[in-house]
Structure formats: C-alpha cells, structure tokens
Image (cartoon, rainbow, N blue to C red):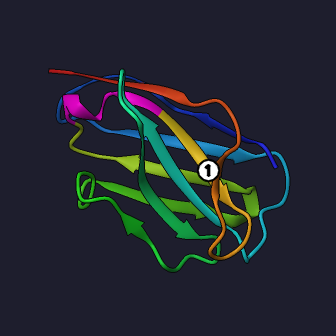
Amino acid sequence: VQLQASGGGLVQAGGSLRLSCAASGRILNSDGVGWFRQAPGKAYEFIARMAWTGDTIWYTDSVKGRFAISTDNAKNTVYLQMNRLKPEDTAIYYCSLQSRPGGAWHIRGPGTQVTVSS
C-alpha cells in the first residue's frame, strides 16, 4: 500500500489546514495509520496515530488540542485537521502505516509541505 499525502500549503499563524492521505490499496482493520513530520534540519517526529478501526488515538504533546486525526474507511483516506497553526509546525508532513499491531511504522510515500508564517 502506498500513501499519497496532500493538502499542504502556506498559511498564517493561527490558521488551519486539512491534510489528506489517500491509500493506493485497502487498509486492513488490523492496521494503524499515522502522521509524521520533519522540520528543516530536524529528525522525523511522530505526531498522531490511530487504529484503522477508529480507536487508540494518540497525539504528541506539541499538537494535542490543535490537531485531529481521522479516517474515511470507505475512501481509504486518512486526514489530519490542523488548527491554530504555529510557525514551529512548519515541516514536511508524511502519512504512515503500521501493518500489524505492535509493528514498525513505515512512511509509504511522499510528504506534503506545510509552511506557517508568523
């Protein structure tokens, strides 16, 4: 399964964006889906994840209360709603897949650039 992220862009601080991640194949109920980001010169940061079934949602502290991960299972699509964006949210955002419970997370396609201006 390949994952194509889209929806990035340039936004002012305090604004919102919704990222989408379309899967090329079927995501299974046993899979997990999530979002990473990589800011310039920094390591990948895991920011949100959830089970494809809709439970066990987790966020890293820096985005908790501002970002929301969701899925449309019929469309095989994962979303990341990002509100109250900050300049430090500037990064390339990637979607990822965990193909079995407790397994490794893999980025499965190109990311989308999000730039937040101050």
Q: Quadrant of the C terminus?
A: top left
Q: Position of residue 34 (x, y in %)?
A: 54, 56
Is residue 99 rendered to the left or right of residue 53?
A: right
Viewer-side residue, 85 vs 101: 101
| Callout 1 secondary element | strand
Where on the picture, by quarter, is residue 108? top right
Is residue 87 rendered to the left or right of residue 45?
A: left
Q: Position of residue 59 (x, y in %)?
A: 35, 62
At 66% across and 53% down in the image, what residue appears? 77
State whether residue 9 is above or below residue 33: above
At 74% across and 65% down in the image, what residue appears? 99
Using a 10 Å C-alpha cutoff, classify the residue at mark 1 as few (fewer than 14 neighbours), some (14 to 19) or many (20 or more).
many
Viewer-side residue, 65 vs 97: 97
The span picked out in magenta is 86-92
Which residue bears the numbered disc 1? 96
Where on the picture, by quarter, is residue 101? bottom right
Q: Looking at numbered disc 1 in the image, what kind of residue is underneath it? A: Ser
Is residue 92 rendered to the left or right of residue 97?
A: left
Is residue 29 rendered to the left or right of residue 72?
A: right
Where on the picture, by quarter, is residue 54? bottom right
State whether residue 4 is above or below residue 53: above
- Residue 94 shown in magenta: no
At 28% across and 35% down in the image, what residue appears? 89
Q: Position of residue 24 (x, y in %)?
A: 82, 45
Q: Position of residue 39 (x, y in %)?
A: 36, 28
